Image (cartoon, rainbow, N blue to C red):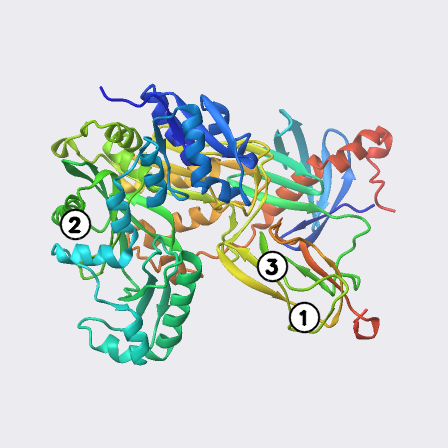
């Protein structure tokens, strides 16, 4: 059996620990790079070897290709798992590793480049006969012509609202919605200038925007010869184009529609000679149409819901395939079992514009139980800062039915105790408790449309009194005072003069 | 001394009427008979008017973090001398609306500034925001250097406002 002598994890937090678990299962020695601020994290403490890397900023360290390649050489690691984010879809990183004779655990560099360029990838998909939303590329000639609105009108099926996207963006970055023709000119210019600034690539395109569509994506897995799918996930519950709650299967698809959309996804992956784990994202309209959005060439944050309903280990499969083995899974054996829901646990004030929160983890109690998986990089004394993404952990629940998965998720959110930094757990429970969520009536506008119903609940008076009593009795300040108060005076109420 | 606790910007007085193993507290005009049994540094059983709650507690300075009945609370114990409401101080203090990092400082200590003048460029959630002065005055202190991280509520810029224009 082909296997790696040692795999280096080029990531942090919960996904670093997730990759480490797969390496342990496959009995492959592990190594990890870390920025000083992650020194005490579980993945760094548990990996066989850990090497500190530095950067102008903490995230800069995890983006430093030369440094990471040099650590691989120093440790003799035969492969790198990039996780998600950071360098996971960076073709230059993949090339630098290849030049040093180190394997990149992910797809080939051609697939990364093709799918990383959103304009090229949607043209590729269209050429192979798969559906894409009506769109127009805003190249220099369209801008020079001076009348973008007329150019838009000339494209069949392109109507307002529109969304302007950066070709080098993806995952919600560099996106703006345009509601009417008079916003068009300035939105397009701003998007192009932002795209130039953030991605060094000013190319943008306009696409029809579906305000009430679902976000449905298909998990694919390839080994360079064969491509299979592992069904779909629905990820419609989003804020700022970022996912909050994901589930598998989607409550919107029947068996025929599922087969259709999954076959399109595998068709796209096959056309790209795809190897490793990947995700083909679609918009699914209320009319039952679906359109290709983009393909992500990495393991996704929400991969656990697929793992739980299909009983597979996607990260282990990625590692095996990268070592040159064939897929160990067969399409016909992939049978869905029950329902899984993932909640992204983020350090943020969800009831006040989802602004990030910071703090220090003072106490931690993770939920546990049958069908429950808590993927987390949390640890006591962890300093939660604005240096990294606010997502700290993922709560994943697997149950026989969707209804049971929802109820167990709500209970588990209440069992998670993290003291010292504000989390979004109460908000997530509010979404899961909403009748529209229960009936599967979800689309990407859910968070906004139900904003009022999802606002912070009025504080329960009795609960508040209990909280204040608990605060008073546990406050170190008053405990010291109690200890110093002679018993006879205790009954008098000496604070009352 | 009157113990006070702040929950969601509202100040609540907690008055002990009877101390001992069984404690009687007056909270917002209601009497509560409470008992607290510590299980370890962070866990306790709290009995309120006869019914028991499992309680998780952690304290960081004046901030108490509690969790019971599936909900987390962040409660500030009020400093005796801080008082409620500002005392004129803070008029020229620009606080961070959210945690982030300083991209660029466009003013220096000692500079005179006008309302609307850009003082700092910050980045948070991958979005850049200009921090502008809302007052006229002289910069007393710049809280952070370029590249520094700051927390929500940190003082980014402290501006000395001439007393004639202050609403002291």
Q: Which residue in the structure is indicated by mark 2?
A: A261
* Label 1: few (<14), some (14–19) or many (≥20) C-alpha neighbours in 10 Å: some
**Is residue A292 at all visible to an observer of this figure?**
no
Mark 3 lies on a secondary structure that is strand
| Position of residue B54 measured from the top left corner of the image (x, y, whole percent) | 56, 32
Query: Mark 3 near mark 1, Cβ–Cβ under 8 Å?
Result: no
Taking depth in this image into account, of A9 and A375 the one nearest to the observer is A9
Residue B39 to residue A332: above or below: above
| Position of residue A438 measured from the top left corner of the image (x, y, whole percent) | 32, 49
Pointer 1 chain: B
| Position of residue A479 measured from the top left corner of the image (x, y, whole percent) | 75, 33
For the N terminus of chain A, the quadrant is top left
* Same chain shared by disc 3 and disc 1: yes
Q: Mark 3 or mark 1, which has the lower sequence index?
A: 3
Pointer 3 chain: B
**Is residue A438 at all visible to an observer of this figure?**
yes
Residue found at the very far front of the displayed protein: A99
Q: Quadrant of residue A210?
A: bottom left
Residue A332 to residue A205: above or below: above
Q: Which residue in the structure is indicated by mark 3?
A: B104
Q: Quadrant of residue A227?
A: top left
Q: Which residue in the structure is indicated by mark 1?
A: B134
* Label 3: few (<14), some (14–19) or many (≥20) C-alpha neighbours in 10 Å: some
Residue A485 to residue B118: above or below: above
* Callout in the foreground (3, 1): 3
Whole-number angstrom distance, CA of label 2 to CA of label 1: 54 Å
Q: Residue at x 38, y 65 (%)?
A: A176
């Amino acid at each position: 059996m082909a296997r790696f002598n040692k795999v280096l994890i080029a990531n942090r937090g919960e996904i670093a620990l997730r990759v480490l678990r797969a390496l342990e299962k496959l009995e492959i020695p592990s190594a990890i790079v870390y920025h000083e601020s992650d020194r005490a994290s579980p993945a760094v403490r548990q990996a066989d070897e850990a090497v500190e890397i530095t950067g102008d900023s903490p995230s800069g360290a995890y983006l430093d290709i030369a440094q990471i390649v040099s650590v691989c050489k120093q440790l003799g690691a035969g492969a790198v798992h990039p996780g998600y984010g950071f360098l996971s879809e960076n073709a230059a990183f993949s090339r630098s590793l290849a030049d040093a004779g180190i394997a990149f655990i992910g797809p080939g560099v051609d697939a990364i480049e093709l799918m990383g360029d959103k304009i090229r990838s949607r043209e590729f998909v269209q050429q192979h006969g798969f559906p894409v939303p009506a769109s127009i590329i805003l190249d220099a000639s369209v801008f020079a012509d001076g009348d973008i609105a007329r150019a838009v009108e000339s494209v069949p099926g392109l109507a307002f609202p529109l969304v302007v996207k950066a070709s080098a963006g993806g995952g919600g970055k560099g996106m703006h919605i345009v509601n009417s023709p008079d916003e068009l000119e300035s939105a397009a210019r701003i998007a192009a200038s932002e795209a130039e600034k953030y991605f060094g690539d000013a190319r943008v395109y306009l696409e029809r925007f579906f305000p009430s569509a679902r976000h449905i994506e298909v998990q694919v897995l390839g080994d360079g010869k064969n491509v299979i799918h592992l069904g779909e996930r629905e990820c419609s519950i989003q804020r700022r184009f970022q996912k909050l709650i994901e589930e598998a299967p989607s409550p919107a698809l029947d068996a025929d529609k599922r087969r259709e959309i999954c076959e399109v996804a595998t068709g796209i992956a096959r056309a790209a000679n795809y190897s490793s784990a990947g995700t083909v994202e679609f918009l699914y309209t209320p009319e039952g149409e679906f359109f290709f959005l983009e393909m992500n060439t990495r393991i996704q944050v929400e991969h656990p819901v697929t793992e739980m309903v299909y009983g597979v280990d996607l990260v282990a499969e990625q590692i095996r395939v990268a070592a040159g083995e064939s897929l160990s899974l067969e399409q016909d054996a992939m049978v869905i079992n029950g329902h899984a829901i993932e909640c992204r646990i983020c350090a943020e004030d969800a009831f006040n514009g989802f602004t990030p929160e910071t703090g220090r983890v003072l106490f931690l109690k993770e939920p546990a139980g049958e069908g429950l998986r808590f993927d987390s990089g949390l640890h006591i004394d962890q300093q939660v800062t604005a240096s990294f993404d606010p997502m700290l952990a993922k709560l994943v629940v697997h149950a026989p039915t969707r209804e049971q998965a929802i109820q167990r998720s709500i209970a588990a959110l209440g069992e998670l105790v993290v003291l010292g930094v504000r989390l979004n757990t109460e908000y997530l429970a509010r979404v899961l408790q909403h009748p529209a969520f229960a009936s599967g009536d979800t689309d990407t506008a859910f968070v906004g449309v139900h904003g009022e119903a999802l606002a912070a609940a009025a504080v329960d008076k009795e609960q508040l009194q209990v909280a204040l009593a608990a605060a008073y009795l546990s406050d170190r300040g008053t405990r010291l005072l109690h200890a110093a108060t002679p018993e006879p005076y205790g009954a008098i109420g000496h604070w009352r003069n | 001394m009157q113990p006070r606790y702040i929950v969601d910007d509202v100040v609540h007085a907690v008055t002990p009427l009877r101390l001992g193993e069984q404690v009687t507290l007056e909270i917002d005009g209601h009497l509560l008979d409470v008992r607290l049994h510590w299980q370890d540094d962070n866990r306790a059983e709290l009995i309120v008017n006869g019914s028991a709650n499992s309680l998780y507690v952690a304290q960081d300075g004046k901030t108490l973090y509690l969790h019971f009945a599936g909900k987390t609370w962040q409660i500030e114990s009020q400093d005796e001398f801080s008082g409620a409401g500002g005392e004129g101080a803070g008029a020229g203090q620009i606080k961070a609306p959210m945690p982030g990092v300083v991209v660029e400082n466009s003013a220096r200590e000692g500079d005179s500034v006008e309302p609307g003048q850009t003082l700092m460029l910050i980045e948070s959630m991958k979005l850049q925001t200009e921090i502008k002065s809302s007052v006229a005055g002289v910069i007393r202190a710049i809280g952070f250097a370029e590249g520094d991280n700051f927390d929500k509520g940190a003082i980014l810029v402290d501006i000395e406002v001439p007393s004639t224009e202050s609403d002291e």
